[in-house]
Image: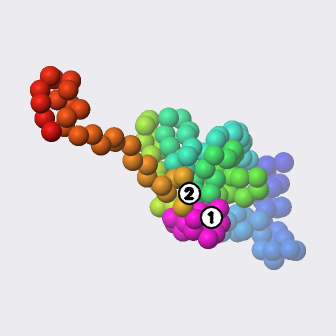
Amino acid sequence: MRKWLDQIANKKKNETTQEPPVQRWQKEQSFLQAWGTKELFPTTHWEMREVSRDCFVSYLGNKYSVPFRYAGHQVKIKVTLEKQLEIFDEVECIAQHPILSGETRTHVRFEHYEGMQEAKEKERKQQNPIGLATQDSIVSTPYVEARSLAAYAAFEGGDFE
């Protein structure tokens, strides 16, 4: 069989490529990749995380930023074949970070915080559209009774007026 392949079949012109398989093989060999160095299909493991008030999720002892509007929400995370951490809301990928080595490290994307001040201001205005003083905006000062020095003198037994 091997003799027939080498001497006859692989030397005959192929009707599709219009060249013999042995010539085609020599051209295509340089484009082939090593076998078994990459996973054949994604093996994804999803995990749920709650986004902290400061807009981070934790994974393997490290923290990764998430857009501020997701603070307090549940998100799904997964690690890609390229060693990236992808963070998803219900449907779309909302953040992507390189996996950090070690522990207690933080990876921040500053664009996740863009517009946060404006959003907080807008929310505050919606809750109080006419700008009335609210409990948060009133600074309470303690009441201090005003007395004459005679009251203190009476306690000491002295005479002040």
Task: For label 2, count other residues whose C-alpha is less than 10 Å away and answer few (under 14), some (14-19) or many (20+).
Answer: few
**Which residues fall within the magenta stretch?**
114-132
Q: Nearer the viewer, residue 4 or 55?
A: 55
Assess whether mark 1 and mark 2 are in contact (beta carbons under 8 angstroms): yes
Q: Which amino acid type is marked by label 1?
A: Asn
Coordinates of residue 73 in the picture (x, y in percent): 67, 47
Q: Which mark is residue 128?
A: 1
Q: Which residue is mark 2?
A: 134
Q: Residue at x 77, y 56 (%)?
A: 91
Work out which residue is located at the far bottom of the displayed protein and give it: 18
The reply, left or right, for residue 128 in relation to residue 23 is left
Please report whichever mark, 2 or 1, sits nearer to the chain's N-terminal start.
1
State the SS at label 1: loop
Residue 103 sits above or below residue 77 on the image? above
Callout count? 2
Mark 2–mark 1 Cα distance, whole angstroms, equals 8 Å
Pick whichever, 82 or 1, lies toward us: 82
Quadrant where the C terminus is found in the figure: top left
Kindly indicate the quadrant of the structure image that contains residue 123. Answer: bottom right
Residue type at mark 2: give it: Thr
- Dividing the picture into quadrants, the one containing residue 29 is bottom right
80 and 107: which is toward the camera: 107
* Residue 122 drawn in magenta: yes
* Residue 3 appears in the picture as rendered: yes
Q: What secondary structure characterizes most of the magenta part?
A: helix
Residue at image point 79% right, 49% down: 2
Type of colouring? rainbow
Frontmost of labels 2 and 1 is 2
Mark 1 Cα-neighbour bin, 10 Å: few <14, some 14–19, many ≥20: few
Query: Along the horizontal axis of the image, is 20 left or right of 73?
Result: right
The image shows residue 27 at horizontal and vertical percentages of 65, 69
Q: Is residue 46 left or right of residue 17?
A: left
